[in-house]
Amino acid sequence: MPFQSSFLRHTYSGFEPSQAFDIVYGGSFEHRLLSSKRANMTHQRLTLDEIRLETGCYDFPVIAQGSMPPNSMCIGFMADGSDVTRYNTVAIGQEDIQIYPAGVELLYHAVGASRWVNFTVPEERLQETALARTGRLLELPGFAATSVRLRPGGRAALTCLADDAMGIAKSLEPTGGMAPEFATEVSRSLVAGYVDELANATPGGQSESSSGERRHHHLILACERLVVSGEEADIALAEIARRSGYSLRSLELIFRRSVGMTPGRWFMNVRLNGALRDLLGAGPTCTVADVASRWGFRHMSRFSEQYRKAFGELPSRTLSRSRT
């Protein structure tokens, strides 16, 4: 079969990022807006047969939560905004790069503008290249996402590699894209570049606290699932703390340290963004009251005011616009 390559670029604006679910090919993510200011997001994907290079650029604070592709390893890093971004509640160093085993959960949280790069590659391909170039296999995580530290300048080198590949693909797309032979060479260059940097990487700086951060990440996700499951979207914080096995004070401290906000504010953002997605994708018989009830809002006037503060317009306006 001929070598398959393709390039895709898509820009999202306004509320559109909240419906960008496939930003990592084969994975599934939901975006949550954190500001009422107009959002602009650009996503690029370069497919080179079995590997994919993707970038996401946000000019707004955002939470993206979901799972990575189930059949391939992903390697991600922050091209811009590492100082304002966390992954799975872990702070990201300037030269840090994240390795995600197949199917792992990811909580991406940026409080400012950010740009990420993700490289999806079969582990076998990565290790074959490592053995050929370095004479040894890479030490890769088995189950949990792991951060390693590149040599000084390593992140910049990978950023240039990714930007060059995307720039070439974009320039050639109007004339039919990359020729198979050239696409094969670009693919080899990308894999080799990542292998060279990973081969010289060292453990990330947060290794001593990683187990605690993983526990807190899992706790936050478990509390979220409790909030959005069944008919308990408006469940009291004290009850969430009781079911989680923590005191309310401890739960508040964990959330503040891990995601920079109180659990009440975090869960409210989850519910409001859920309502936003439902209104944007509403069917012809759906009403604002239906959506509000689904997300645990019992008082319509209060829901409308909270929604307006979060997104800059009333829910009725969002519903009306989604039908035009």
Image (tube, rainbow, N blue to C red):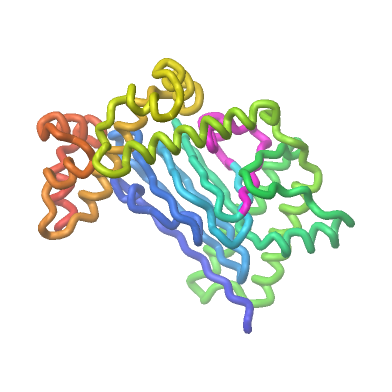
Q: At x 44% / y 37%, what residue is drawn?
A: 222
The percent coordinates of residue 137 (x first, y second) are: 82, 54
* Position above or below: 315 against 283: above
* Extreme-top residue of the structure: 249
Left or right placement of residue 75 versus residue 223 in this view: right
Residue 35 appears in view:
yes
Q: Residue 226 lies in what quarter of the image?
A: top left
- In percent of width and height, residue 188 lies at 72, 65
Relative depth, front residue between 137 and 225: 225
Residue 283 appears left or right of 266: left
The residue that appears at 48% across and 23% down in the rendered structure is: 254
- The range drawn in magenta is 78-101
Measured as percent of width and height from the top left, residue 47 is found at: 56, 66
Reply above or below: 37 against 190. Answer: above
Residue 40 vs residue 216, the one in the foreground: 216
The quadrant in which the N terminus is found is bottom right
The quarter of the image holding the C terminus is bottom left
